[in-house]
Image: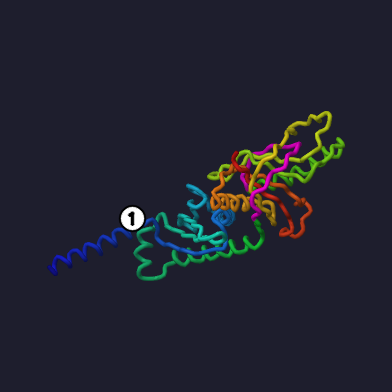
Amino acid sequence: MKKKLGLIFALLIIGTIAWYLFIWPSDFLVTFKTKAIPGTVNQTIKLWANGLENSHLLHQKDVTNFTHQMQFNDSLHNYQWNIKSLNDSTSQVKVYVKDVNNSLTNRISIIFKETDFEKRTKKTLKDLMLAIKEHTENFKVSLVGIDEIAPKYCAYLSFKSHQKDKALHMMQNYSFLNSVIIENNIELDGPPFIEVENWNMQQDTVTFNFCYPIVKPDSLIKIKHLKYKPIARKKAIKSVYNGNYITSDRAWYALIDYAKKEGLNIEEKPFEIFYTNPNMGGNELQWKAEVYMPLKD
């Protein structure tokens, strides 16, 4: 009986070691909490990773599951991110890190000592945690609840870009739209806004219209690329965003989370109204935008 129990115990140990060395998906696992919702964590990680040399996104299943590859000297490290919402303002992040070319060596060495791979991983993720903290201190999202998008008539330009480049297109075209309005004595009917027509969350791309609301004139000026359209009244959930407009999409994710929590059916087509001209600079926390997510009819 004792021999049989000993054999079973030995097989369990061998099985556990084999599972750890050859099946477990990473060489090293780091878990941390951060005061940010999953969408904000996702975008901040990507912004941080894009600032590193030899770093690129390998795959994204959804906002909470994606993988980066980073090169450190002659080593390729895969960072698999898993983000879980703990409450309205806090997420848990699990990072499964694997050295593509030296995985088995790392797994064995880590058992006996703190390896260079482990030290580098810890330092890299400490830098990320600091980046997330600094980023979340530079914007604010205040959820309002159910409201409506007011009807307007607008002159607009259409773009397709990465969502982080949305504000760049706005800044590059403020002067053009302003000159059209002034030179043709067109009466404005409120602050500029963007209307997102398609948001690809896996690719982080958007197709959107940058719009100037106007009082519809008797005749419409024909200018290359400039188009006109009415905006219909529509029920939506609303938030107020303060911060640089480059990262106003943080409010998009907050609205999606709010809709899920409240059981609301939404169209993932954000609508943003901008009350501050970013070309004027100033304290970014005083920049204001109203951000809406339309409700499905």
Q: Main secondary structure of the magenta part?
A: strand
Image quadrant occupied by the N terminus: bottom left
At 73% from the left edge and 34% from the top edge, which residue is drawn? 230
Asked whether, in this view, residue 46 is left or right of residue 241, the answer is left
Question: Eyeballing the image, is 294 above or below 245?
Answer: above
**Magenta segment range?**
143-163
Asked whether, in this view, residue 8 is left or right of residue 87, the answer is left
Asked whether, in this view, residue 125 is left or right of residue 151, the answer is left
Question: Eyeballing the image, is 262 above or below 134?
Answer: above
Residue 76 visible at all: no
At 41% from the left edge and 54% from the top edge, which residue is drawn? 100
Question: Eyeballing the image, is 271 above or below 35?
Answer: above
Badge 1 marks a residue whose secondary structure is loop
Answer with the quarter of the image where residue 27 lies: bottom left
At 56% from the left edge and 57% from the top edge, which residue is drawn? 37
Residue flagged by tag 1: what amino acid is it? Ile
At 41% from the left edge and 62% from the top edge, which residue is drawn? 28
Q: Which residue is mark 1?
A: 23
**Percent x, y of residue 182:** 86, 40
Q: Can residue 8 be found in the magenta stretch? A: no
Asked whether, in this view, residue 58 is left or right of residue 146, the answer is left
Image quadrant occupied by the C terminus: top right
Front-most of residues 291 and 125? 291
| Local crowd size for mark 1, using a 10 Å CA cut-off: few (<14), some (14–19), many (≥20) | few
